[in-house]
Amino acid sequence: MSKKQLNEDDFDNKYNLADIESENFEVNGQLETFGKDLEIVLKYANEHPKRVWTVIDGDDDKLWIVSGYHLVNRVYYYITKEECIENFEDYVIEMME
């Protein structure tokens, strides 16, 4: 039996983005990979690592939301109010064509 591929809607139904403002994004809880945003992400990665999510550019030409702080192929970060439930979770972002 194969694992069901979870998507961005599944992520949004399970987690709420934190009320953290970014100078680069209009959505609270969405943070950039540099500057003040990255300082915030690193603080959370050290103090609340299960609340940090990395949006990465996958080898399959899709964006993925993956639990934890990652450097490779990162596009931006999310900080959630809730902690990641599983040891590792990933969600595909459906791209508009």
Image (tube, grey):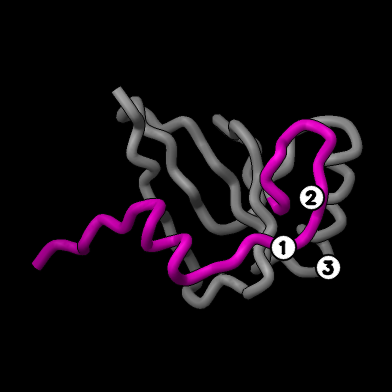
Q: Disc 1 marks which residue?
A: 18
Dot 1: element: loop
Task: Look at the image and give the residue range highlighted in magenta.
Answer: 1-29
Q: From the viewer's perspective, is residue 34 above or below residue 31?
A: above
Crowdedness near tag 3: few (<14), some (14–19) or many (≥20) residues, C-alpha within 10 Å? few
Q: From the viewer's perspective, is residue 82 above or below residue 74?
A: below
Name the kind of residue labelled 3 in the image: Glu
Q: Is residue 13 left or right of residue 27?
A: left
x and y percent of residue 11 in the render? 44, 61
Q: CA distance from mark 3 to mark 2?
A: 10 Å
Magenta stretch: residue 18 in it? yes
Residue 90's disc number: none
x and y percent of residue 1 in the render? 9, 68
- At x 34%, y 25%, the residue is 61
Residue 47's disc number: 3
Name the kind of residue labelled 1 in the image: Ala
Q: Is residue 68 left or right of residue 56?
A: right
Magenta stretch: residue 50 in it? no
Q: CA distance from mark 1 to mark 3?
A: 15 Å
- At x 61%, y 57%, the residue is 68
Name the kind of residue labelled 2 in the image: Val
- Image quarter of the C terminus: top left
x and y percent of residue 73 in the render? 55, 30
Quarter of the image where one finds residue 37: top right
Residue contact at pointers 3 and 2, CB within 8 angstroms: no
Q: Disc 2 marks which residue?
A: 41
Dot 3: element: helix
